[in-house]
Image (tube, rainbow, N blue to C red):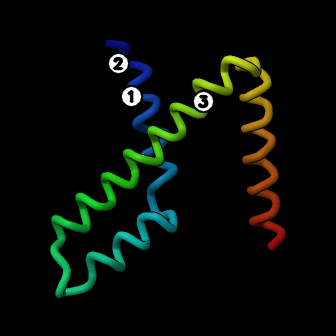
Amino acid sequence: MDWKTLAMVFGTVFLAELGDKTQLATVLFAADRDVSKWLVFIGASLALIATSAIGVLAGGVLAQYVSERALRTVAGAGFIVIGLWTLWR
């Protein structure tokens, strides 16, 4: 097992998810006194697993047709555009 890759993916996704709208939605669901915290945890976990699976599958398919360098360039440019849009807004 490549522990370095595992740690890199975990750290990147953990930081990306921290404090985003997904986590805020989970907090709101968990704040409801009539809702099981375990069900909120399981539902949120399954949703993250499903979206991660889609990302892995899409990345695998894209990698067959587009070079890794091009994917990194497009992803980097996309993050910059989103960041600038967020600052401008």
Q: CB of mark 2 within 8 Å of CB of mark 3?
A: no
The x, y position of residue 63, in whole percent, is: 66, 21
Q: CB of mark 1 within 8 Å of CB of mark 3?
A: no
Of circles 2 and 3, the one toward us is 3
Residue plotted at (47% across, 54% down): 17
Q: Please, what secondary structure does the residue beneath circle 3 have? A: helix
First of labels 1, 3 by sequence position: 1
Give the residue at the far bottom of this rendering. Answer: 33
Q: Residues within 10 Å of mark 3 (few under 14, many from 20)?
A: some
Q: Quadrant of residue 72?
A: top right
Q: CB of mark 1 within 8 Å of CB of mark 2?
A: yes
The x, y position of residue 19, in whole percent, is: 47, 64
Q: Residue under label 3, please give it.
A: 59
Please state which amino acid type lies under the numbered disc 1: Ala
Residue plotted at (51% across, 32% down): 56
Q: Residue under label 1, please give it.
A: 7
Q: Residues within 10 Å of mark 1 (few under 14, many from 20)?
A: few
The x, y position of residue 62, in whole percent, is: 68, 27
Please state which amino acid type lies under the numbered disc 2: Trp
Q: Could you tell whether 56 is left or right of 61 in the image?
A: left
Placement of 30 over or under 51, stated as above or below: below
Q: Please, what secondary structure does the residue beneath circle 1 have? A: helix
Q: Residue under label 2, please give it.
A: 3
Of circles 1 and 3, the one toward us is 3
The x, y position of residue 6, in whole percent, is: 38, 25
Residue plotted at (45% across, 38% down): 53
Q: Residues within 10 Å of mark 2 (few under 14, many from 20)?
A: few
First of labels 2, 3 by sequence position: 2
Cα distance in 3D space between marks 1 and 2? 6 Å
Placement of 39 over or under 35, stated as above or below: above
Q: Could you tell whether 30 is left or right of 88 in the image?
A: left
Which quadrant: the N terminus?
Answer: top left
